[in-house]
Image: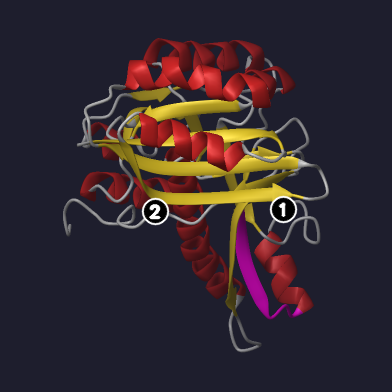
Amino acid sequence: MSKYTLTVACVTRRGIVAAIAGFLAENGCNITDSSQFDDMETGRFFMRVSFVSEEKADLASLREGFDAVAEPFGMTWAIHDESDRMKVIIMVSRFGHCLNDLLYRWRIGALPIDIVAVISNHLDYQKVVVNHDIPFHYIKVTKENKPEAEARQMAIVRETGAELIVLARYMQVLSDAMCSEMSGRIINIHHSFLPSFKGANPYKQAFERGVKLIGATSHYVTADLDEGPIIEQDIIRVTHAQSPDDYVSLGRDVESQVLARAIHAHIHRRSFLNGNKTVVFPASPGSFASERMG
């Protein structure tokens, strides 16, 4: 049986859930997992439904039929075949911990995506990427050539049909134009010290202030640097006995995990933009399972 995901966002009102459930039942579909949220402050409604087609309804017919359900409610909606893998581009600079973690998760099927390219402004990870049979694009970025470099990056996005860009410690600020064109489709990772410890050596600054918790934040990229809607966060406890280098090593682990979880939420269409925030629904049963052990 084909398995699909339906995502819905609209102004909240009575009858939405009933209309969706009725449509699926009438088309021979059985709901296997469902999450919904009414934001009482904004009046917005969000829903994600996983379902199987028990009577061989195909994607095209489901999409065509759902138009009549969505129109009266003014829904923003989509139906996706869960077997289709999202096309992803990873961008990285000289810190490789997130890239290597993502490549491993991709290789064992823990992140069911198609990595269509890796773009970097350095050559450090060219061999690693090529050894995974993934196209590697070296695009040097300077103050003088930044518009041209970004144009090349976006050309790769369009040529590959990439649906998501992951900034795996890519240490360049993206232009407002790129952020706007890829709105809701660029995910970044950074340490959770912002805005407390901005600038160079944030872990050293945190060490000097004697912090007890360090962590990481993954968010959608907007024109406001590091201020985009947050998808995922986590922390780890540190003590006075640990060094600045310990902070860095521990922080790398948290960054890798947080970024992977944010990507997992996005590719499984569990993450919804809600103004300056996000709605992130729990994962469906079985979605964390890997195809291989290693």
**Residue 23 percent coordinates (x, y):** 45, 31
Q: Residue at x 78, y 54 (%)?
A: 198
The stretch of residues the image draws in magenta is 210-217
Residue type for callout 2: Ser
Q: Does the magenta stretch mainly form a helix, a strand or a loop? A: strand
Does the magenta portion include 166? Answer: no
Lower position in the chain sequence, tag 1 or tag 2: 1
66 horizontally vs 210: left or right: left
Q: Residue at x 66, y 46 (%)?
A: 278
Q: Is residue 215 visible?
A: yes
Does the magenta portion include 213? Answer: yes
Looking at the rendered image, the disc whose residue lies closer to the viewer, 1 or 2, is 2
Rate crowding at label 2 as few (under 14), some (14 to 19) or many (20 or more) other CA atoms within 10 Å.
some
Secondary structure under the numbered disc 1 in the rendered image: loop
220 horizontally vs 292: left or right: right
Q: Is the residue 204 above or below the residue 286 in the image?
A: below
- The part of the image, by quadrant, that contains residue 50 is top left
Which residue bears the numbered disc 1? 200
CB within 8 Å, label 1 to label 2: no
Secondary structure under the numbered disc 2 in the rendered image: loop
**Residue 7 percent coordinates (x, y):** 51, 35
The foreground one among 275 and 91 is: 275
Q: Residue at x 75, y 30 (%)?
A: 223
Q: CA distance from mark 1 to mark 2?
A: 39 Å
Which residue bears the numbered disc 2? 284
The foreground one among 124 and 59 is: 59
**Residue 131 percent coordinates (x, y):** 21, 36
Residue type for callout 1: Ala
Rate crowding at label 1 as few (under 14), some (14 to 19) or many (20 or more) other CA atoms within 10 Å.
few
